[in-house]
Amino acid sequence: MKKIVKAKINGILIRAEEGTTILDAAKKVQVKIPTLCKHPDLKPSASCGLCIVKVKGSNKMLRACCTPLDEGMDIITHDPEIVDIRRTVLELILSNHPNDCLKCDRNNDCELQKLVADFGIRQSPFTQVLRDLPIDNSTKAVELEPQKCILCGRCVDVCQNRQDVWALSFLERGMQTRISPAGDILLNESPCVKCGQCSAHCPTGAIVEQDDIGKVWEALLDPDKYCVVQIAPAVRASIGEAFGLTGKNMTKQLYALLRRLGFKAVFDTNFAADVTIMEEASEFEERLIKGTKSLPLITSCCPAWVDFMEKFHSDMIEHFSSCKSPHEILGVLSKTYYTQKNGLDPSKITMVSIMPCTAKKYEITRSNEMSASGFQDIDIVLSTRELARMIKQAGIDFLSLPDEEADSMLGEYAGAGVIFGATGGVMEAALRTAYYFVTGTDLGKVEFESVRGLKGIKETEIEVAGKKIRIAIAHGLGNVEIVLDKVREAKKNNQEPPYHFIEVMACPGGCVGGGGQPYMVTDELRLKRAKVLYQDDTDKQIRCSHQNPYIKRLYTEFLEKPLGPKPEKLLHTKYTPRPIYKR
Amino acid sequence: MTEPKLSEDIKKVVEKWRNKKGSLVMILHEIQNAYGYVPRETSLELSKYLDVPLAQIYEVITFYNYFKLEKPGTHRIAVCMGTACYLKGAPVILQELKELLDVEEGHNTKDGLFALDVVRCLGCCGLAPVMMIDSKVYGKVKKEEIMNILSEYGKEE
């Protein structure tokens, strides 16, 4: 047990576990110390200086975000002098921050703007000096506007330490300090994998998702276009947050909403996740039983992970599932199977994907296989955050919408499809079906508790037909190397592979913690979102992809058999090593 | 050490410093001293060789003024901005140089003939304002003389 320390905050006696920061301890006495650079999900960087407090007996002010509470401390969090200093800190930040608020992506959703409002700043005592730094929108996924950067370091921390990508860095020092890829190249020329974690953690409008709402409105207005839409698993668990509802499954309201926005058909990515499982579990069965290709099999649903692998771990290409990600599969099915069945012209279809992700914006043009239908399979990708804005623009009272169902049959999913949005979910879904493929019988209990949860690397063994299947699950790209190094090591020594099956999701927590999800994510929130998905799974009559009657029908009517020539052409892709730096 | 690649010479330097604390800065020093700058190709190679992300190498290079990312111009102009020179009109001299050469401080002219730098004190305040080109000192510089001074450095090489 941890030692308990006693201290005083604003005269109130407090007990807290040793190591608790003053910032967290203050919450226990109903005091909110203002912060700007501190994100609850990241280590404190102590760069902004807004959270300074006075400690009796010390003549300097301490930063509450990174100072642990000490025995006997007597702390003042607010007095006129402290408030005045905090105001000066904000005024100094504003002195090189553009006054673009009204036209900024983060208007009304900006941590700096909120603090400036709270402090009632009305004047600019310091001359404004704006840095002449260009906007970088080279990636199609995120947009970097370094002029709006307050140098809190969150994006750099998450990019370097959480994700191990090292696309973003601090260049130069003092007044010249800026965030940029090494050597002022474009993000698209850097190792950036478009995961968007930088944008999800940025307190201001310095890094935002590429806004594609305009394109969607335009398509919806065009009488020549037949607009269809799909929602990813993780979106239903988080979109409510933008309207003040946490931990609520919004699937049915989303279906209703998307129809009201003007989409002619509303599909669910979960259906395609079931297709992914049919293909991926078949691949696994082939590798495991027939030994056609080497083990382990590695999942490929996450485009940021795919990009990361192609750049940093291209020696793993042979282990990669060739299966496309679910939304790409739904895209190609909507422009082939769906149009053929309904007598529609695929060239008129505009397919919009609502994703928790920024990398999906990149994925839709990543290779020729993303146009397997003969047209670009997905036309536009919107992140959860963009959809929330679109709902507000449309003036729809989202939370009061009636329940509706998705359009058959690209909207009918098994429980396995919906858990794709949480780390371990793809593995669990695949195991349910792979078990059936290998043994010919269904599992008694379909839940695999050991693959759930937020541990960075999850390893477990599962028995299938008397054979022990070793699996590993990594989320957050920083956890990948340890797993892959074990595979490499075994290969080098001609040993049996350490795992049979590996799942990787680029974002911490999987898609529920995606780079396009609502702001201020913490592990607590990731778990809440995941819980929504697991509940949706539990509530489903059909839990396994291969039992989904619409999946069976899709294969009978159209795809024939998993890994057959038609799936091969439409549902699978190729990978290629890519340079880490283009220049 | 002539080729801006991770030549055998640099490999030796790297091996000398490998596994020592602060080795990256020391390696960069040796590269800077040898080439007069740290070429991007070398940084890219170094990144692979040391297994240090390029971003980290650039964070170090751009933090310290000593490291340059551009190949230095043939002739280095150093304009003194020490107190005496500053008061005696060094800013005017610097501005004139910038205009005549169409270059910002810390950078090279397009033809690569000159590199323009600002320095803190050249130690001959009595001659203020002072500038140096390579190792030659010009004292009591007047704005009107600069064109003539520069013309001494034709494209003889």
Image (cartoon, coloured by chain):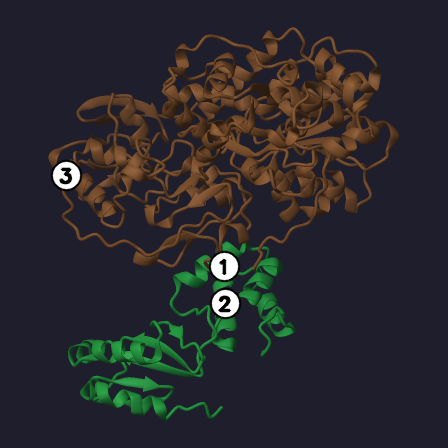
Chain colours: A brown, B green
Q: Earlier in the sequence, mark 2 or mark 1?
A: 2
Query: What residue is at 62 percent from the left and 8 percent from the top?
Result: A540
Residue tagged by mark 3? Answer: A122
Q: Is residue A250 left or right of residue A35?
A: right
Amino acid type shown at disc 1: Ile
* Nearer to the camera, A99 or A176: A99
Callout 2–callout 3 Cβ contact below 8 Å: no
The residue identified by callout 2 is B28
Name which residue lies at 68% across and 49% down.
Answer: A577
Which residue sits furthest right? A290
| 1 and 3 marks in contact (CB < 8 Å) | no
Residue topped by disc 1: B57
Residue A513, how many percent across, how many down?
50, 29
Q: Amino acid at mark 2?
A: Leu
Which quadrant would residue A85 be assigned to in this image?
Answer: top left
Say if mark 2 contacts mark 1, CB within 8 Å.
yes
Residue A259 visible in the displayed image: yes
For the residues beneath circles 2 and 3, the answer to whether they share a chain is no
Vertical relation: A285 (above or below) B46: above
